[in-house]
C-alpha cells in the first residue's frame, strides 16, 4: 500500500511560529512532527512508499526529506496553488495505481496502531468505501463529530458545529478505496475538500475505527503546548512516552 501525507498548508493558526517553520516540521519534544509520521508509517511492513505534498516553505520540507533515513521511499509533489485535501488526492490518483491507499493530515500527533487499522479496513463491513480513524476528543466543537450505527458505520457527520452530539471525532486518517477517487473526479474541478465535499457523499459507507491511543491536532498554540505537556508527563497508557518518541 502507498500513503499520502498532507503537509502543504500554511499553518495559519500556529503563526508566528509557522511564518518560519512549515507546520509539518514543528518540533514536538525536540523532534519534527513529520518524523513521527514517517517512523510510524515505515514501521508497518504494508507501507511501500509515501507521497508528501508541499506548498508553504516547501524548500524546508524538501531539505528535511532529503536528509531522512527514509528518503529513498518518499516522494514529494509541489502544489504551486493549494488544491484542497480532495484535490491533492485527485491530482495524484495515478500514484495509487487504482488500489486502496492511506491518507493522513500530517498536523496530528498520533500513536495509533497502523497494523490494526489496515487489518480492520480489510475486514470492514460490506459496502464500506473508506475506513476513518476516530478518537475521543476533549474539544468536540473543533472537530468533525461522528454518529455511528451498531456496525461502526458513520450515519451522521457533523463538521465543527457549535453543539456537537458527542465526542467521537474524525482523526483525519483514512484508507480510501479507488471509488472515492472516482467520485472526487466526477465533481469536475481541481480543487476539492475531502471533509465537506467527499465525506458527506459517503456517509453510510464509512467504517469508523476508534483508536484508544494518543491522538492530538497540534494546529493551535494551545494544542501544541498541550502536546508538549503530554510528552513531559509520559502518557504511556495512551501510547505516548516522554522523551523523544511515540510508541
Image (cartoon, rainbow, N blue to C red):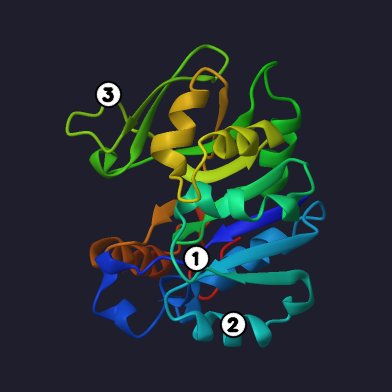
Residue, disc 3: 165
* Residue at the image point whose x is 67% and y is 31% from the top: 179
Neighbour tally class for label 1: few under 14, some 14-19, many 20 plus, Cα within 10 Å: many
Picture coordinates of residue 109, whole percent (x, y) = 47, 60
Q: CA distance from mark 1 to mark 3?
A: 30 Å
Mark 1, secondary structure of its residue: loop
Earlier in the chain: of badge 2 and badge 1, it is 1
Marks 2,1: beta carbons within 8 A: no
* Residue at the image point whose x is 70% and y is 46% from the top: 101
Residue, disc 1: 7
Horizontal arrangement in the rendering, residue 60 relative to residue 175 (left or right):
left
Residue 195 seen anywhere in this rendered image of the structure: yes
Mark carried by residue 135: none
Picture coordinates of residue 141, whole percent (x, y) = 24, 39
Picture coordinates of residue 170, whole percent (x, y) = 44, 38
Earlier in the chain: of badge 3 and badge 2, it is 2
Picture coordinates of residue 8, whole percent (x, y) = 47, 67
Horizontal arrangement in the rendering, residue 194 relative to residue 206 (left or right):
left
Which residue is at the far top?
A: 150
245, above or below 171, in the image: below
Of circles 1 and 3, the one toward us is: 1
Q: Quadrant of the C terminus?
A: bottom right
Of circles 3 and 2, the one toward us is: 2
Among the 4 quarters of the image, the one containing residue 225? bottom left
Marks 1,3: beta carbons within 8 A: no
Mark 3, secondary structure of its residue: loop
Residue, disc 2: 62
Mark 2, secondary structure of its residue: helix
Amino acid at each position: 500500500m502507498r500513503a499520502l501525507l498532507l503537509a502543504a498548508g500554511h499553518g495559519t493558526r500556529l503563526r508566528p511560529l509557522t511564518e518560519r517553520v512549515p507546520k509539518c516540521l514543528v518540533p514536538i519534544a525536540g523532534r519534527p512532527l513529520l518524523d513521527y509520521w514517517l517512523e510510524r508509517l515505515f514501521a508497518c511492513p504494508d507501507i511501500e512508499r509515501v507521497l508528501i505534498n508541499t506548498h508553504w516553505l516547501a524548500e524546508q520540507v524538501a531539505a528535511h526529506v532529503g536528509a531522512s533515513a527514509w528518503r529513498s521511499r518518499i516522494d514529494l509533489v509541489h502544489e504551486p496553488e493549494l488544491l484542497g485535501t480532495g484535490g491533492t488526492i485527485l491530482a495524484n490518483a495515478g500514484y495509487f495505481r487504482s488500489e486502496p491507499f492511506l491518507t493522513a493530515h500530517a498536523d496530528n500527533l498520533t500513536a495509533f496502531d497502523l497494523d490494526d487499522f489496515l487489518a480492520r479496513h480489510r475486514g470492514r463491513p460490506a459496502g464500506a468505501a473508506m475506513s476513518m480513524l476516530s478518537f475521543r476528543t476533549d474539544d468536540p466543537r473543533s472537530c468533525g463529530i461522528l454518529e455511528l450505527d451498531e456496525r461502526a458505520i458513520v450515519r451522521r457527520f457533523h463538521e465543527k458545529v457549535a453543539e456537537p452530539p458527542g465526542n467521537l471525532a474524525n482523526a483525519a486518517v483514512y484508507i480510501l478505496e479507488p471509488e472515492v477517487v472516482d467520485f472526487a473526479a466526477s465533481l469536475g474541478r481541481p480543487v476539492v475538500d475531502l471533509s465537506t465535499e467527499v465525506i458527506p457523499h459517503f456517509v453510510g459507507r464509512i467504517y469508523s475505527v476508534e483508536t484508544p491511543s494518543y491522538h492530538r491536532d497540534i494546529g493551535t498554540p494551545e494544542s501544541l503546548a498541550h502536546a508538549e505537556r503530554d510528552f513531559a508527563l509520559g502518557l504511556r497508557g495512551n501510547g505516548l512516552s516522554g522523551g523523544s518518541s511515540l510508541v
